[in-house]
Image: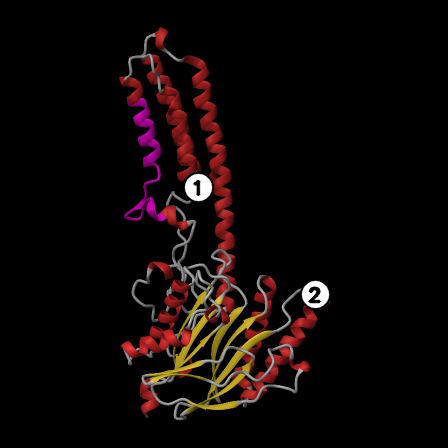
Amino acid sequence: MRRWRLLPLFGGRRRRRRPPTAQGTSPRPSAASARYPLSDGSLPGDNALRGPLRLLRVRGRSVAWVPPNALLLTIALVDWETTGRFRTLSWLVLAPGLAAVLCGVWGTVSAAVLAVAVYELEDHAWPHELQIGLPNFILVASGGALAVLACAVRVRGERRMLHMQDLVEITRHTVLRPLPDGWGGLDHAAVYLAADSIVRVGGDFYDIQPGPRGTRVVLGDVQGKGLGAVTAALALLGTFREAAYHEQALDSLADRLELRMARHVRYRVGLGYDDDPRFATAVLVGFPSADTSYVEVVNFGHEPPLVVAPGGVRSLPPGEGLPLGLGDLGDGLPPTLRVPLAPGETLLLVTDGVSEARDAAGEFFPLRDRVAVALARDPQAVDPGSLVRLVRDGTLSHCGGRLDDDTAILAVRRPPAADGA
């Protein structure tokens, strides 16, 4: 029985390490975006399991035992104050039932034993003709035993769920690894909006990789959803993180990603997963060095990034190439474009979860117009954190908080000091 000491979620015995907090996190987000804090891939601190736990803690200590004992005391007092014609003592069975919902196993055992003890003491305090006797005693005792059993099943399920959440967190941090401030010599901010609040990871991906020939940025969206999309995203990110460091030219990196997607598709087909994702749209951006006033862009059929400046918003040229994995159907890789990026301008990249977010009337989210309106109000609000918060809150507000697709939002720019050098 000693192993049960580790199981109760409300006993305060087991401390769980919190995931790292996001760099550059904004002040408290709005209610619509509370589930999607500005982040570098970390999970929010609150979830469905920890919510009741936090509500039943005072100064770090569990008070889950208070409601069952308060209910037990109330029932006993009500029974004591009756005239004997209306006995409520058998209602004590409710106390261990409530404890089974709120407390751990030992807390439920305590409530069940206490309910039986109070029943015996108080029932025998009445005259013999007013005692409710053995049948109700059996009800209270058997109800307490069933409550203990139900609590054990509940705690075991919650422990398994917490373990699954740990696995999801590890997967999420593998796909969307935390990025330090100033990583690759860039100011950056990102957020991942998961359509599935339990799984919290999908086929959208992004990353920043510094190297000897500058910093490379990628953002993409794998076809489909589920585990197949996650494995495809992880395969592409693994290749990007390695090749972006070693490859001299951006088109060579693009070729490596195209080849990796094709190999991944062949591998999954060989395993018999014929309905797995076959392609992924993506945008590659290369920042050659800190003293350049341009970026290199390769677009694999993805939503064109926006360049956000104090003077307005403009779109980069649309992607002329096919998505990753479909290169054999076209005339080769998409061209590498050299796009001016002046000091103070921020590159905003999003997946189609933003552009295809619909409101109740079926209207798409007007990303460019929303950004332009925000800049008209505050021309200096071009830093990555402000832009990501704007897009995140605007998208969730537009669709009423009901996301139909996973969404990644990434904003990057050279630090102003480096631009002005």
How many marks on residues?
Answer: 2
Residue 5: assigned label? 1
SS assignment at label 1: helix
SS assignment at label 2: loop
Foreground of the two, 14 or 104: 104
Query: Residue 307: image x %, image y %?
Result: 41, 83
| Residue 370 horizontal side relative to residue 275, left or right | left
Q: Amino acid at mark 2?
A: Asp
Query: Residue 322: image x %, image y %?
Result: 61, 80
Residue at which label 2 appears: 274
Query: Residue 266: image x %, image y %?
Result: 70, 72
Identify which residue is drawn at 64% across, 86% down.
332
Residue 3 located within the stretch drawn in magenta? no
Q: Is residue 99 above or below residue 184?
A: above
Q: Marks 1 and 2, Cα distance to the nearest angstrom?
A: 47 Å
Q: Residue furthest front?
A: 361
Q: Which residues are magenta?
A: 54-77
Q: Amino acid at mark 1?
A: Arg
Mark 1 Cα shell of 10 Å, populated few (<14), some (14-19), many (≥20) = some
Query: Residue 183: image x %, image y %?
Result: 41, 79
Identify which residue is drawn at 49% across, 29% down.
146
- Number of the front mark, 1 or 2: 2
Identify which residue is drawn at 43% across, 23% down.
140
Q: Does the rendering let one see residue 3?
A: no
